[in-house]
Image: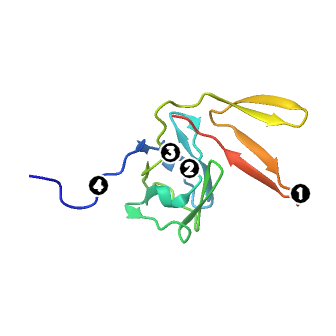
């Protein structure tokens, strides 16, 4: 029998490391990691976050900045936590480094868990996070 419904998404689904041991009723900002390596989701809508058994709504209940999650209110001590990455960029051959040309030459960057700041013409700096799994 054929599959009925939307096709399954492809991508690297992953479970983030448990941060519940850090919950203390006051702290709201936590580092996100997979296998103790920094993880940069970039978009809160790609995460399924459960806090104390309740699924959290992106933006309203939590926000993402670089590799950190900030909850709207501090998780209570002893609350359980899990977070599943629902989608990431699917690369057939993962990048290990990136070479960027500049007026004065080129630089090669190690991409895993690194960030790159780029300044636009108006002088505003934008950070780009790289996460390879």
Q: Residue at x 89, y 57 (%)?
A: 123
- Upstream in the sequence, badge 3 or badge 2? 2
Residue 105 disc label: none
- Mark 1 near mark 2, Cβ–Cβ under 8 Å? no
Mark 1: few/some/many CA within 10 Å (<14, 14-19, 20+): few
- Upstream in the sequence, badge 1 or badge 4? 4
State left or right for residue 10 relative to residue 42. left
- Upstream in the sequence, badge 3 or badge 1? 3
Q: CA distance from mark 3 to mark 2?
A: 10 Å
Residue 123 disc label: 1
Q: CA distance from mark 3 to mark 1?
A: 29 Å
Q: CA distance from mark 4 to mark 2?
A: 23 Å
Mark 4: few/some/many CA within 10 Å (<14, 14-19, 20+): few
Q: Nearer the viewer, mark 1 or mark 2?
A: 1
Q: Nearer the viewer, mark 4 or mark 2?
A: 4
- Upstream in the sequence, badge 1 or badge 2? 2
Mark 2: few/some/many CA within 10 Å (<14, 14-19, 20+): many
Q: Secondary structure at mark 3?
A: loop
Residue 41 disc label: 2
Q: Nearer the viewer, residue 48 or 104?
A: 104
- Upstream in the sequence, badge 3 or badge 4? 4
- Mark 4 near mark 2, Cβ–Cβ under 8 Å? no
Q: Residue at x 81, y 30 (%)?
A: 106
Q: Which residue is mark 4?
A: 7
Q: Secondary structure at mark 4?
A: loop
Mark 3: few/some/many CA within 10 Å (<14, 14-19, 20+): few
- Mark 3 near mark 1, Cβ–Cβ under 8 Å? no
Q: CA distance from mark 1 to mark 4?
A: 43 Å
């Amino acid at each position: 029998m054929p599959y009925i419904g939307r096709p399954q998404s492809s991508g690297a689904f992953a479970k983030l490391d448990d941060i519940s041991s850090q919950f203390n009723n006051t702290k709201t900002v936590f580092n996100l990691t997979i296998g103790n390596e920094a993880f940069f989701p970039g978009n809160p809508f790609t995460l399924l976050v459960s806090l104390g058994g309740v699924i959290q709504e992106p933006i309203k209940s939590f926000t993402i900045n670089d590799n950190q999650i900030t909850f709207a209110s501090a998780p209570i001590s002893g609350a359980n936590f899990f977070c599943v990455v629902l989608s990431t960029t699917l690369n057939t051959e993962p990048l290990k480094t990136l070479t960027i040309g500049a007026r004065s030459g080129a630089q090669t960057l190690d991409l895993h868990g690194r960030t790159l700041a780029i300044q636009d013409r108006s002088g505003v700096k934008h950070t780009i996070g790289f996460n390879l799994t």
